[in-house]
Image: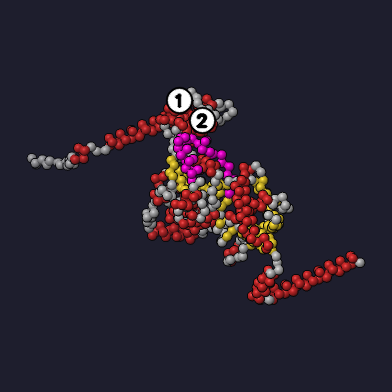
Amino acid sequence: MVPATMAEMWTTMGSTIASFMFIWAIVRQYCPYEIRRFFEKYTHRFMGYFYPYIRISIHEFSGDRLKRSEAYAAVEAYLSSNTSKSAKRLKAEMGKDSRNLVLSMEEYERVTDEFQGAKVWWVLNKALSPSRSMSMTYYPEQEKKFYKLTFHRKYREMITATYLEHVLREGREIRLRNRQRKLYTNSPGYKWPSYKQTMWSHIVFEHPATFETMALEPEKKQEIIEDLLTFSKSKDFYARIGKAWKRGYLLYGPPGTGKSTMIAAMANLLSYDVYDLELTAVKDNTELRKLLIETTCKSIIVIEDIDCSLDLTGQRNKKSEKSGAEVENKSNKERKEPKEEGNSSSRVTLSGLLNFIDGLWSSCGGERLIVFTTNYVEKLDPALIRRGRMDKHIELSYCSFKGFKVLAKNYLNLENHQMFDTVEKLIGEIKVTPADVAENLMPKSPLDDPEKCLANLIQALEEAKEEQEEAEAAKEMDEESSKENEPTKEDATEPPQVNKEIEKPDT
Protein backbone atom coordinates (compact mmCIF):
# COMPACT_ATOMS: atom_id res chain seq x y z
CA MET A 1 0.00 0.00 0.00
CA VAL A 2 2.87 2.39 0.71
CA PRO A 3 4.51 2.09 -2.73
CA ALA A 4 1.19 2.76 -4.39
CA THR A 5 0.71 5.84 -2.26
CA MET A 6 4.22 7.08 -3.11
CA ALA A 7 3.61 6.49 -6.81
CA GLU A 8 0.36 8.43 -6.68
CA MET A 9 2.07 11.27 -4.84
CA TRP A 10 4.89 11.55 -7.44
CA THR A 11 2.35 11.37 -10.26
CA THR A 12 0.31 14.20 -8.75
CA MET A 13 3.42 16.29 -8.13
CA GLY A 14 4.65 15.77 -11.69
CA SER A 15 1.35 16.79 -13.25
CA THR A 16 1.17 19.86 -10.98
CA ILE A 17 4.67 20.98 -11.97
CA ALA A 18 3.92 20.39 -15.64
CA SER A 19 0.72 22.43 -15.40
CA PHE A 20 2.57 25.25 -13.65
CA MET A 21 5.31 25.31 -16.30
CA PHE A 22 2.71 25.37 -19.07
CA ILE A 23 0.85 28.28 -17.49
CA TRP A 24 4.12 30.14 -16.88
CA ALA A 25 5.13 29.69 -20.52
CA ILE A 26 1.80 31.10 -21.68
CA VAL A 27 2.14 34.06 -19.33
CA ARG A 28 5.69 34.83 -20.51
CA GLN A 29 4.62 34.68 -24.14
CA TYR A 30 1.41 36.66 -24.09
CA CYS A 31 1.58 38.82 -20.94
CA PRO A 32 3.13 42.28 -21.56
CA TYR A 33 6.63 42.78 -20.22
CA GLU A 34 5.61 45.71 -17.99
CA ILE A 35 2.96 43.66 -16.22
CA ARG A 36 5.29 40.72 -15.72
CA ARG A 37 7.96 43.08 -14.38
CA PHE A 38 5.42 44.59 -11.96
CA PHE A 39 4.41 41.20 -10.57
CA GLU A 40 8.01 39.99 -10.31
CA LYS A 41 9.05 43.09 -8.37
CA TYR A 42 6.27 42.79 -5.82
CA THR A 43 6.63 39.02 -5.61
CA HIS A 44 10.30 39.41 -4.63
CA ARG A 45 9.35 42.08 -2.12
CA PHE A 46 6.61 39.88 -0.66
CA MET A 47 8.91 36.87 -0.41
CA GLY A 48 11.49 39.02 1.31
CA TYR A 49 9.31 39.24 4.39
CA PHE A 50 9.40 35.45 4.77
CA TYR A 51 12.78 34.49 3.25
CA PRO A 52 15.25 34.46 6.18
CA TYR A 53 18.48 34.72 4.17
CA ILE A 54 20.48 37.68 2.83
CA ARG A 55 22.66 37.62 -0.27
CA ILE A 56 25.70 39.75 -1.11
CA SER A 57 27.29 39.71 -4.58
CA ILE A 58 30.94 40.58 -5.22
CA HIS A 59 31.58 41.14 -8.93
CA GLU A 60 34.88 40.63 -10.71
CA PHE A 61 34.64 43.91 -12.62
CA SER A 62 32.95 47.18 -11.73
CA GLY A 63 31.69 49.68 -14.26
CA ASP A 64 32.53 49.00 -17.90
CA ARG A 65 35.19 46.35 -17.15
CA LEU A 66 37.74 49.03 -16.41
CA LYS A 67 39.47 47.41 -13.46
CA ARG A 68 39.37 44.02 -11.76
CA SER A 69 37.95 44.25 -8.25
CA GLU A 70 40.48 43.86 -5.44
CA ALA A 71 37.68 42.49 -3.23
CA TYR A 72 36.91 39.77 -5.79
CA ALA A 73 40.59 38.74 -5.94
CA ALA A 74 40.80 38.64 -2.13
CA VAL A 75 37.66 36.48 -1.86
CA GLU A 76 39.03 34.18 -4.55
CA ALA A 77 42.28 33.72 -2.61
CA TYR A 78 40.46 33.22 0.69
CA LEU A 79 38.15 30.55 -0.70
CA SER A 80 40.99 28.77 -2.50
CA SER A 81 42.71 28.25 0.85
CA ASN A 82 39.80 27.74 3.24
CA THR A 83 37.23 25.83 1.21
CA SER A 84 39.31 23.61 -1.11
CA LYS A 85 38.73 20.64 1.22
CA SER A 86 34.93 20.87 1.09
CA ALA A 87 34.43 21.72 -2.60
CA LYS A 88 33.88 18.82 -4.99
CA ARG A 89 34.82 20.60 -8.24
CA LEU A 90 38.12 22.47 -8.20
CA LYS A 91 40.46 24.08 -10.70
CA ALA A 92 44.23 23.99 -10.22
CA GLU A 93 46.83 26.62 -11.13
CA MET A 94 50.58 26.71 -10.67
CA GLY A 95 51.60 28.58 -7.54
CA LYS A 96 54.63 30.63 -6.60
CA ASP A 97 57.97 29.43 -8.02
CA SER A 98 56.07 26.68 -9.89
CA ARG A 99 56.53 24.32 -6.93
CA ASN A 100 52.95 23.68 -5.86
CA LEU A 101 49.38 23.83 -7.12
CA VAL A 102 46.85 26.39 -5.92
CA LEU A 103 43.30 25.01 -5.84
CA SER A 104 40.20 27.18 -6.23
CA MET A 105 36.50 26.44 -6.61
CA GLU A 106 35.01 25.85 -10.04
CA GLU A 107 32.09 27.80 -11.48
CA TYR A 108 28.67 27.18 -9.89
CA GLU A 109 30.31 25.28 -7.05
CA ARG A 110 28.84 25.89 -3.59
CA VAL A 111 30.98 25.75 -0.45
CA THR A 112 30.23 26.31 3.23
CA ASP A 113 32.22 28.42 5.67
CA GLU A 114 31.79 29.00 9.41
CA PHE A 115 32.75 32.08 11.38
CA GLN A 116 32.08 32.59 15.11
CA GLY A 117 29.24 30.10 15.04
CA ALA A 118 27.60 31.51 11.90
CA LYS A 119 27.31 29.37 8.78
CA VAL A 120 27.59 31.03 5.37
CA TRP A 121 27.51 29.77 1.79
CA TRP A 122 29.63 30.91 -1.13
CA VAL A 123 28.78 30.29 -4.80
CA LEU A 124 30.79 31.31 -7.86
CA ASN A 125 28.35 32.38 -10.56
CA LYS A 126 28.70 33.92 -13.98
CA ALA A 127 26.34 35.89 -16.18
CA LEU A 128 26.45 36.99 -19.79
CA SER A 129 26.46 40.71 -20.43
CA PRO A 130 23.56 41.80 -22.69
CA SER A 131 24.26 42.81 -26.27
CA ARG A 132 24.60 46.57 -26.56
CA SER A 133 24.81 46.95 -30.32
CA MET A 134 24.55 45.04 -33.55
CA SER A 135 28.33 44.80 -33.71
CA MET A 136 28.23 42.41 -30.79
CA THR A 137 26.68 39.76 -33.01
CA TYR A 138 30.11 39.14 -34.47
CA TYR A 139 31.51 38.26 -31.05
CA PRO A 140 30.15 36.01 -28.28
CA GLU A 141 28.82 37.79 -25.23
CA GLN A 142 31.30 38.52 -22.48
CA GLU A 143 31.08 36.65 -19.21
CA LYS A 144 30.81 38.45 -15.89
CA LYS A 145 31.81 36.40 -12.87
CA PHE A 146 30.73 37.14 -9.31
CA TYR A 147 30.76 35.51 -5.90
CA LYS A 148 27.45 35.28 -4.08
CA LEU A 149 27.49 35.12 -0.28
CA THR A 150 24.35 33.83 1.50
CA PHE A 151 23.76 33.95 5.27
CA HIS A 152 20.93 34.13 7.79
CA ARG A 153 19.68 37.60 8.49
CA LYS A 154 20.20 37.25 12.23
CA TYR A 155 23.97 37.37 11.52
CA ARG A 156 23.69 40.48 9.36
CA GLU A 157 25.67 42.84 11.59
CA MET A 158 28.45 40.35 12.32
CA ILE A 159 28.86 39.32 8.65
CA THR A 160 28.93 42.84 7.23
CA ALA A 161 31.11 44.33 9.97
CA THR A 162 33.49 41.51 10.94
CA TYR A 163 33.35 38.50 8.61
CA LEU A 164 33.84 40.38 5.31
CA GLU A 165 36.75 42.33 6.80
CA HIS A 166 38.25 39.02 7.95
CA VAL A 167 37.83 37.52 4.46
CA LEU A 168 39.51 40.49 2.74
CA ARG A 169 42.41 40.59 5.20
CA GLU A 170 43.07 36.85 4.99
CA GLY A 171 42.65 36.88 1.22
CA ARG A 172 45.27 39.62 0.75
CA GLU A 173 47.79 37.76 2.91
CA ILE A 174 47.18 34.51 1.00
CA ARG A 175 47.64 36.31 -2.31
CA LEU A 176 50.99 37.68 -1.17
CA ARG A 177 52.16 34.22 -0.07
CA ASN A 178 51.05 32.46 -3.25
CA ARG A 179 51.66 35.34 -5.62
CA GLN A 180 53.41 34.32 -8.81
CA ARG A 181 54.98 37.24 -10.61
CA LYS A 182 53.99 37.69 -14.23
CA LEU A 183 55.29 39.33 -17.39
CA TYR A 184 52.53 41.10 -19.32
CA THR A 185 52.28 42.40 -22.86
CA ASN A 186 49.41 44.40 -24.31
CA SER A 187 47.07 42.89 -26.89
CA PRO A 188 46.07 44.91 -29.98
CA GLY A 189 42.99 47.02 -29.27
CA TYR A 190 40.88 45.56 -32.07
CA LYS A 191 40.95 42.14 -30.33
CA TRP A 192 39.51 43.35 -27.01
CA PRO A 193 35.81 42.78 -27.85
CA SER A 194 36.49 39.15 -28.76
CA TYR A 195 35.57 36.27 -26.51
CA LYS A 196 37.64 36.18 -23.30
CA GLN A 197 40.30 38.43 -24.84
CA THR A 198 41.87 40.68 -22.24
CA MET A 199 43.87 43.86 -22.70
CA TRP A 200 46.98 42.22 -21.26
CA SER A 201 48.33 38.74 -21.94
CA HIS A 202 50.85 37.24 -19.54
CA ILE A 203 53.33 34.48 -18.86
CA VAL A 204 55.17 33.56 -15.68
CA PHE A 205 58.08 35.92 -14.99
CA GLU A 206 61.16 33.77 -14.36
CA HIS A 207 64.09 36.04 -15.21
CA PRO A 208 66.96 35.20 -12.81
CA ALA A 209 68.74 38.58 -12.90
CA THR A 210 69.62 40.24 -9.60
CA PHE A 211 71.66 43.25 -8.62
CA GLU A 212 74.36 40.93 -7.27
CA THR A 213 74.95 39.52 -10.77
CA MET A 214 74.92 42.85 -12.61
CA ALA A 215 78.19 44.25 -13.98
CA LEU A 216 77.85 47.59 -12.22
CA GLU A 217 79.95 49.60 -9.78
CA PRO A 218 79.07 48.66 -6.17
CA GLU A 219 78.43 52.28 -5.15
CA LYS A 220 76.01 52.89 -8.02
CA LYS A 221 74.34 49.54 -7.42
CA GLN A 222 73.77 50.28 -3.74
CA GLU A 223 72.36 53.70 -4.55
CA ILE A 224 69.75 52.21 -6.89
CA ILE A 225 68.80 49.47 -4.39
CA GLU A 226 68.28 51.98 -1.58
CA ASP A 227 66.18 54.21 -3.85
CA LEU A 228 63.92 51.29 -4.82
CA LEU A 229 63.47 50.01 -1.27
CA THR A 230 62.72 53.50 0.01
CA PHE A 231 60.05 53.94 -2.65
CA SER A 232 58.36 50.62 -1.80
CA LYS A 233 57.97 51.71 1.85
CA SER A 234 56.83 55.30 1.21
CA LYS A 235 53.05 54.99 0.89
CA ASP A 236 52.35 57.37 3.78
CA PHE A 237 55.01 59.81 2.59
CA TYR A 238 53.49 60.11 -0.90
CA ALA A 239 50.02 60.57 0.62
CA ARG A 240 51.35 63.32 2.90
CA ILE A 241 52.99 65.32 0.11
CA GLY A 242 49.98 64.89 -2.20
CA LYS A 243 51.59 62.86 -5.00
CA ALA A 244 50.59 59.61 -6.64
CA TRP A 245 52.58 56.65 -5.34
CA LYS A 246 54.72 56.09 -8.43
CA ARG A 247 58.26 56.77 -9.57
CA GLY A 248 59.83 57.11 -13.01
CA TYR A 249 63.19 55.69 -14.07
CA LEU A 250 65.07 56.52 -17.27
CA LEU A 251 67.69 53.95 -18.25
CA TYR A 252 69.97 55.12 -21.03
CA GLY A 253 73.24 54.06 -22.55
CA PRO A 254 74.76 52.20 -25.51
CA PRO A 255 73.29 48.84 -26.62
CA GLY A 256 74.48 45.89 -24.57
CA THR A 257 75.00 47.76 -21.30
CA GLY A 258 72.28 45.90 -19.35
CA LYS A 259 69.14 48.04 -19.47
CA SER A 260 66.74 45.08 -19.78
CA THR A 261 68.71 43.18 -17.15
CA MET A 262 68.33 46.15 -14.81
CA ILE A 263 64.54 46.01 -15.18
CA ALA A 264 64.51 42.29 -14.35
CA ALA A 265 66.70 42.92 -11.30
CA MET A 266 64.34 45.68 -10.11
CA ALA A 267 61.34 43.33 -10.45
CA ASN A 268 63.11 40.54 -8.55
CA LEU A 269 64.21 42.88 -5.78
CA LEU A 270 60.71 44.26 -5.14
CA SER A 271 58.68 41.20 -6.26
CA TYR A 272 56.76 43.34 -8.78
CA ASP A 273 54.97 42.27 -11.95
CA VAL A 274 56.32 43.63 -15.26
CA TYR A 275 54.08 45.21 -17.92
CA ASP A 276 55.97 45.47 -21.22
CA LEU A 277 54.00 48.14 -23.09
CA GLU A 278 54.28 48.07 -26.88
CA LEU A 279 53.20 51.55 -27.96
CA THR A 280 52.93 50.67 -31.66
CA ALA A 281 50.08 48.26 -30.81
CA VAL A 282 48.08 51.00 -29.03
CA LYS A 283 45.51 52.66 -31.25
CA ASP A 284 45.14 56.01 -29.51
CA ASN A 285 45.36 57.83 -26.19
CA THR A 286 42.06 56.38 -24.98
CA GLU A 287 43.35 52.83 -25.33
CA LEU A 288 46.54 53.89 -23.55
CA ARG A 289 44.50 55.05 -20.54
CA LYS A 290 42.51 51.81 -20.48
CA LEU A 291 45.73 49.81 -20.46
CA LEU A 292 47.02 51.88 -17.54
CA ILE A 293 43.86 51.24 -15.51
CA GLU A 294 44.17 47.49 -16.08
CA THR A 295 47.64 47.37 -14.52
CA THR A 296 47.87 46.26 -10.91
CA CYS A 297 49.70 47.70 -7.95
CA LYS A 298 53.23 46.46 -7.24
CA SER A 299 54.13 46.56 -10.91
CA ILE A 300 56.73 47.97 -13.30
CA ILE A 301 55.42 49.51 -16.53
CA VAL A 302 58.18 49.34 -19.15
CA ILE A 303 58.50 51.09 -22.50
CA GLU A 304 61.73 49.92 -24.08
CA ASP A 305 63.52 51.95 -26.75
CA ILE A 306 61.18 54.89 -26.27
CA ASP A 307 63.00 56.81 -29.00
CA CYS A 308 62.02 54.12 -31.55
CA SER A 309 58.49 53.33 -30.35
CA LEU A 310 56.75 56.39 -31.76
CA ASP A 311 57.62 59.82 -33.14
CA LEU A 312 58.13 61.34 -29.68
CA THR A 313 61.51 62.93 -30.24
CA GLY A 314 60.57 66.52 -29.59
CA GLN A 315 59.51 67.46 -33.12
CA ARG A 316 56.13 68.56 -31.87
CA ASN A 317 55.78 71.68 -33.96
CA LYS A 318 57.72 70.56 -37.00
CA LYS A 319 55.67 68.72 -39.56
CA SER A 320 56.91 67.87 -42.98
CA GLU A 321 55.11 69.78 -45.68
CA LYS A 322 53.91 67.64 -48.50
CA SER A 323 53.11 68.81 -51.96
CA GLY A 324 49.67 68.39 -53.43
CA ALA A 325 50.89 65.63 -55.71
CA GLU A 326 52.23 63.63 -52.75
CA VAL A 327 48.97 63.98 -50.86
CA GLU A 328 47.00 62.96 -53.94
CA ASN A 329 49.24 59.94 -54.53
CA LYS A 330 48.85 58.89 -50.89
CA SER A 331 45.06 59.16 -51.02
CA ASN A 332 44.95 57.14 -54.24
CA LYS A 333 47.13 54.49 -52.66
CA GLU A 334 44.88 54.31 -49.60
CA ARG A 335 41.85 53.89 -51.84
CA LYS A 336 43.49 51.05 -53.74
CA GLU A 337 44.75 49.25 -50.64
CA PRO A 338 41.92 48.56 -48.18
CA LYS A 339 42.75 49.01 -44.52
CA GLU A 340 43.04 45.82 -42.56
CA GLU A 341 41.73 45.86 -39.02
CA GLY A 342 44.61 45.86 -36.58
CA ASN A 343 47.17 47.23 -39.02
CA SER A 344 46.29 50.89 -38.61
CA SER A 345 49.08 53.11 -37.36
CA SER A 346 49.13 54.24 -33.74
CA ARG A 347 47.76 57.69 -32.96
CA VAL A 348 49.28 57.94 -29.50
CA THR A 349 50.57 61.49 -29.02
CA LEU A 350 53.24 62.94 -26.78
CA SER A 351 50.52 64.67 -24.76
CA GLY A 352 48.74 61.36 -24.23
CA LEU A 353 51.95 59.69 -23.10
CA LEU A 354 52.72 62.53 -20.67
CA ASN A 355 49.25 62.20 -19.16
CA PHE A 356 49.82 58.45 -18.94
CA ILE A 357 52.95 59.04 -16.89
CA ASP A 358 51.83 61.70 -14.42
CA GLY A 359 48.36 62.91 -15.41
CA LEU A 360 45.11 62.42 -13.53
CA TRP A 361 44.77 58.82 -14.73
CA SER A 362 48.18 57.89 -13.32
CA SER A 363 46.75 58.12 -9.79
CA CYS A 364 44.42 55.14 -10.43
CA GLY A 365 46.34 52.65 -8.32
CA GLY A 366 49.61 52.95 -6.47
CA GLU A 367 53.06 51.47 -5.98
CA ARG A 368 54.03 51.56 -9.65
CA LEU A 369 57.36 52.11 -11.35
CA ILE A 370 57.42 53.54 -14.87
CA VAL A 371 60.65 52.72 -16.71
CA PHE A 372 61.82 54.08 -20.06
CA THR A 373 64.89 52.77 -21.86
CA THR A 374 66.72 54.42 -24.73
CA ASN A 375 70.05 54.26 -26.51
CA TYR A 376 69.95 57.95 -27.47
CA VAL A 377 68.68 60.13 -24.64
CA GLU A 378 69.39 63.31 -26.62
CA LYS A 379 66.62 62.41 -29.08
CA LEU A 380 63.87 62.49 -26.46
CA ASP A 381 61.65 65.49 -25.80
CA PRO A 382 62.78 67.31 -22.62
CA ALA A 383 59.19 67.32 -21.35
CA LEU A 384 59.18 63.53 -21.44
CA ILE A 385 62.23 63.00 -19.23
CA ARG A 386 62.10 65.95 -16.86
CA ARG A 387 62.24 65.40 -13.11
CA GLY A 388 58.82 64.57 -11.78
CA ARG A 389 58.12 62.28 -14.73
CA MET A 390 61.39 60.40 -14.98
CA ASP A 391 62.53 61.04 -11.41
CA LYS A 392 65.79 59.13 -11.57
CA HIS A 393 68.11 59.03 -14.58
CA ILE A 394 70.45 56.02 -14.61
CA GLU A 395 73.25 55.88 -17.15
CA LEU A 396 74.45 52.38 -17.98
CA SER A 397 77.77 52.84 -19.70
CA TYR A 398 80.65 50.66 -20.88
CA CYS A 399 82.13 47.93 -18.73
CA SER A 400 84.58 48.96 -16.03
CA PHE A 401 87.10 46.77 -14.26
CA LYS A 402 84.78 46.44 -11.26
CA GLY A 403 82.03 45.31 -13.58
CA PHE A 404 84.41 42.80 -15.16
CA LYS A 405 85.19 41.31 -11.75
CA VAL A 406 81.47 40.73 -11.15
CA LEU A 407 81.19 38.96 -14.51
CA ALA A 408 84.31 36.88 -13.80
CA LYS A 409 82.74 35.80 -10.52
CA ASN A 410 79.47 34.90 -12.26
CA TYR A 411 80.90 33.08 -15.28
CA LEU A 412 84.20 31.65 -14.04
CA ASN A 413 83.80 31.70 -10.23
CA LEU A 414 87.02 33.71 -10.00
CA GLU A 415 87.62 36.58 -7.59
CA ASN A 416 91.23 37.14 -8.54
CA HIS A 417 93.72 35.92 -11.14
CA GLN A 418 97.12 36.91 -12.45
CA MET A 419 95.59 37.75 -15.85
CA PHE A 420 93.28 40.35 -14.25
CA ASP A 421 96.02 43.03 -14.48
CA THR A 422 96.14 42.71 -18.26
CA VAL A 423 92.37 42.86 -18.48
CA GLU A 424 92.28 45.96 -16.24
CA LYS A 425 94.79 47.76 -18.47
CA LEU A 426 92.93 46.93 -21.69
CA ILE A 427 89.46 47.79 -20.34
CA GLY A 428 90.79 51.18 -19.24
CA GLU A 429 92.00 51.94 -22.77
CA ILE A 430 88.99 50.90 -24.90
CA LYS A 431 85.21 50.97 -24.75
CA VAL A 432 83.61 47.55 -24.41
CA THR A 433 80.08 46.68 -23.28
CA PRO A 434 79.28 44.18 -20.52
CA ALA A 435 77.53 42.01 -23.10
CA ASP A 436 80.75 41.68 -25.12
CA VAL A 437 82.77 40.86 -22.01
CA ALA A 438 80.24 38.24 -20.89
CA GLU A 439 80.20 36.59 -24.32
CA ASN A 440 83.99 36.13 -24.27
CA LEU A 441 83.98 34.85 -20.69
CA MET A 442 81.33 32.21 -21.37
CA PRO A 443 82.79 28.71 -21.83
CA LYS A 444 82.08 27.36 -25.31
CA SER A 445 82.93 23.70 -24.60
CA PRO A 446 83.44 21.43 -21.56
CA LEU A 447 87.22 21.72 -22.11
CA ASP A 448 87.26 25.51 -21.66
CA ASP A 449 88.86 26.33 -18.31
CA PRO A 450 88.98 29.83 -16.70
CA GLU A 451 92.45 30.53 -18.11
CA LYS A 452 91.32 29.85 -21.66
CA CYS A 453 88.23 32.05 -21.25
CA LEU A 454 90.36 34.90 -19.89
CA ALA A 455 92.80 34.45 -22.76
CA ASN A 456 89.90 34.66 -25.23
CA LEU A 457 88.76 37.89 -23.57
CA ILE A 458 92.26 39.41 -23.67
CA GLN A 459 92.60 38.51 -27.34
CA ALA A 460 89.24 40.12 -28.12
CA LEU A 461 90.19 43.26 -26.18
CA GLU A 462 93.51 43.53 -28.02
CA GLU A 463 91.78 43.19 -31.38
CA ALA A 464 89.25 45.84 -30.36
CA LYS A 465 92.13 48.10 -29.31
CA GLU A 466 93.83 47.70 -32.70
CA GLU A 467 90.60 48.49 -34.52
CA GLN A 468 90.08 51.54 -32.34
CA GLU A 469 93.63 52.79 -33.02
CA GLU A 470 93.20 52.24 -36.77
CA ALA A 471 89.91 54.12 -36.70
CA GLU A 472 91.48 57.03 -34.79
CA ALA A 473 94.42 57.12 -37.21
CA ALA A 474 92.11 57.15 -40.20
CA LYS A 475 90.11 59.92 -38.59
CA GLU A 476 93.26 62.03 -38.04
CA MET A 477 94.32 61.53 -41.66
CA ASP A 478 90.89 62.66 -42.86
CA GLU A 479 91.11 65.76 -40.69
CA GLU A 480 94.60 66.60 -41.97
CA SER A 481 93.59 66.11 -45.60
CA SER A 482 90.55 68.29 -45.11
CA LYS A 483 92.73 71.01 -43.60
CA GLU A 484 95.15 70.86 -46.56
CA ASN A 485 92.30 71.24 -49.03
CA GLU A 486 90.92 74.28 -47.24
CA PRO A 487 91.99 77.66 -48.81
CA THR A 488 94.53 79.67 -46.81
CA LYS A 489 93.87 83.17 -45.54
CA GLU A 490 96.17 84.75 -48.12
CA ASP A 491 94.47 82.88 -50.93
CA ALA A 492 91.14 84.05 -49.73
CA THR A 493 92.15 87.75 -49.60
CA GLU A 494 94.15 87.87 -52.86
CA PRO A 495 92.04 89.27 -55.70
CA PRO A 496 91.56 86.99 -58.66
CA GLN A 497 94.02 87.50 -61.51
CA VAL A 498 92.63 88.48 -64.89
CA ASN A 499 94.63 87.44 -67.94
CA LYS A 500 94.64 90.12 -70.63
CA GLU A 501 96.20 89.75 -74.02
CA ILE A 502 98.44 92.68 -75.12
CA GLU A 503 97.64 93.77 -78.59
CA LYS A 504 100.67 94.23 -80.76
CA PRO A 505 100.66 97.16 -83.26
CA ASP A 506 100.45 96.25 -86.87
CA THR A 507 103.74 96.61 -88.71
The spot of residue 242 in percent (x, y) is: 45, 53
- State yes or no: residue 492 in magenta: no
Q: Residue at x 58, y 29 (%)?
A: 445
Q: Give SS at disc 1.
A: helix
The spot of residue 274 in percent (x, y) is: 54, 47
- State yes or no: residue 213 in magenta: yes
Image quadrant where one finds the N terminus:
bottom right
Q: Give SS at disc 2.
A: helix
Q: Amino acid at mark 1?
A: Asp
Q: Residue 343, can we see it?
A: no
Q: Which residue is mark 2?
A: 408
The spot of residue 132 in percent (x, y) is: 58, 66
Q: In the displayed structure, would residue 46 be above or below residue 223? A: below
Q: Residue furthest top?
A: 418
Instruction: Tell whether 21 sits left or right of 300.
Output: right
Q: Amino acid at mark 2?
A: Ala
Sequence-wise, the earlier of marks 1 and 2 is 2
Count of numbered circles on the image:
2
Instruction: Tell whether 97 sits left or right of 282.
Output: right
- For the magenta stretch, what is the residue range? 202-231
Marks 1 and 2 in Cβ contact (< 8 Å): no
Q: Residue at x 42, y 60 (%)?
A: 328
- Say few, some or many: other residues with alpha carbon within 10 Å of mark 1 (under 14 / 14 to 19 / 20 or more): few
Q: Nearer the viewer, residue 405 or 223?
A: 223
Q: Which residue is mark 1?
A: 421
